[in-house]
Amino acid sequence: MAYINQPIDLQRIFKDLDNRLNKLETAVRFTFPNVTVDPTYYRIGDAWLNITDNEAKIVDSTGTVRVINWT
């Protein structure tokens, strides 16, 4: 909140906007990007679905590419 002494109605408006933004941010559906070849340059936290090998992969915190096992 920008100012401490805002009118109560303005506080309610900002609170409502904040709640709506938080809901939007947490309601996003994540879909792995489909690739035919694993990327050459990747970063920690990147994830993708290699449709040639039919494997979902993610780069862990050490920079290692790991296959996600679904079973």
Image (spheres, grey):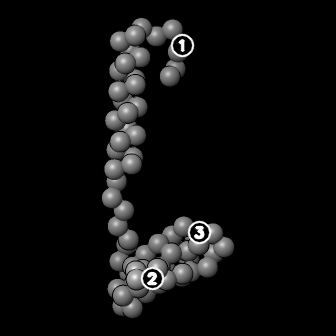
SS label for mark 2: loop
Secondary structure, mark 3, is loop
Image-based side of 55 in relation to 1, left or right:
left
Disc 3: which residue? 44
Mark 2 or 3: the one toward you: 2
Is 26 above or below relative to 46? above
Tell me the CA gap for discs 1 and 3.
Answer: 40 Å
* Pointer 3 local density, CA inside 10 Å: few below 14, some 14–19, many at least 20: few
For marks 2 and 3 on the same chain, the one whose residue lies earlier in the sequence: 3
Q: Earlier in the sequence, mark 1 or mark 3?
A: 1
Residue extending farthest to the front is: 71
**Residue on which the image places disc 1:** 4
Residue at 38 percent across and 33 percent down: it is 19
Residue at 40% from the left image edge and 25% from the top image edge: 15
Q: Is residue 68 visible?
A: yes
Q: Position of residue 51 (x, y in %)?
A: 35, 85
Q: How many marks?
A: 3
> Which residue lies under the disc numbered 2?
69
Disc 3 residue type?
Ile
Q: Earlier in the sequence, mark 1 or mark 2?
A: 1
